[in-house]
Image (spheres, rainbow, N blue to C red):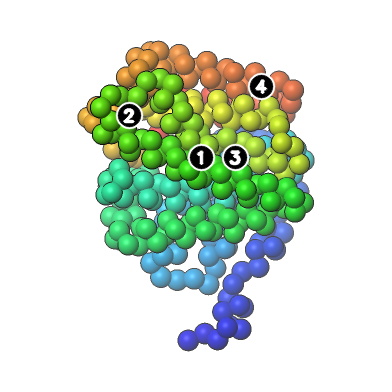
Amino acid sequence: MATPLQRRRLMPDLRRSDDRQIVDLSRKPFAQALADAAAAAQWNIDFALTGLSGPIPDAMKYATAGGKGLRAFLAIESARLHGFDASRSGRAAAAIEALHAYSLVHDDLPCMDDDDLRRGQPTVHKKWDEATAVLAGDALQALAFQLVALVGCPLEARLTLTSTLAVAAGARGMVGGQAMDIAAETAKAPLNLDEITTLQAGKTGALIRWSAMVGPRMAGKSHDPLDVYGDCLGLAFQIADDILDIEGDATEVGKAVGKDADAGKATFVTLLGLQGAKNRAAELVAEACDRLSCYGEDADTLKEAAQFVIARRK
């Protein structure tokens, strides 16, 4: 058994985890920026788990692998617009991906959505068991706050990032939206458009909006056009998910489709119609892009991301 001193030596020094990065504030095409952000987030997560072995860290790495990395991209790209390169924002990207992965692991459990597939692979509780999935999700949530507390910006900005992430993840954000979604399954009447919009602003939109605001908050700003951009993007993302649930192929999407329709749940598609939902998503993307005009061409990659959100097939 390792002594306390040996255990301390096994723990990575997260303060130095990404000092190897070279400062680079140049704008990159969306596909490259997305891939780079996903890689940076995964590197920071894996580094934070250095020295750990067993089913829990293995499940944590499994749960964070293979995602699009959109939230990580938004964190790093919004930081770049405010003068922070990936060596300083990488832990914020890792934090939001860890938190997002935790939500998916728990969302897939039998007591929630009871899904067998995620990102084209068996869900964590299928590959291991339910107890491992619960604990891995718990550990990913804790890791997210460990990482965000060490983002490369002034202390006050780090406190803001940490507290706002807690709000976005909790009862006023993602968890609150998920609770509304569960309650809607047994409600006497389906949700109306305003109610489904409020639900999804929490369940899906809160973490996307937080990601888009990483840069401004690192720079000490409480208000920024990226706040509205993130709000519009989060809603457009969910509408696109509702469309994929109707039009998507499970093999391409990487998870079961048609579950909302089978359950009779209200979605943007059932409320607006398929074409109406597509039109609304396009309007949201246009508004998101318009909000970035103050950044000029330097925000073009974020505009590409907005188009990607409604054009994706998974």
User: Mark 4 and mark 1: span between their CA atoms?
Assistant: 25 Å
Task: Give the numbered dot on residue 291.
Answer: 4
x then y, percent, for residue 93: 60, 47
x then y, percent, for residue 116: 27, 47
Q: Earlier in the sequence, mark 4 or mark 3?
A: 3
User: Mark 1 and mark 2: span between their CA atoms?
Assistant: 26 Å
Residue 60 sits in which quadrant?
A: bottom left
**Label 1 vs label 3, nearer the camera:** 1
The quadrant of the image that shows the C terminus is top left
Q: Is residue 247 left or right of residue 42?
A: left
Q: Is residue 7 left or right of residue 190?
A: right
To which residue does mark 1 refer?
172
Q: Earlier in the sequence, mark 1 or mark 2?
A: 1
Q: Nearer the viewer, residue 1 or 131?
A: 131
Q: Is residue 280 visible?
A: yes
User: Mark 3 and mark 2: span between their CA atoms?
Assistant: 25 Å
Q: SS of the residue at dot 1?
A: loop
Residue 13 sits in which quadrant?
A: bottom right
Q: Who's the residue at 56% across and 28% down the image? A: 231
Mark 2, other Cα within 10 Å: few <14 / some 14–19 / many ≥20 = many
**Label 1 vs label 2, nearer the camera:** 1
Q: Is residue 70 visible?
A: no
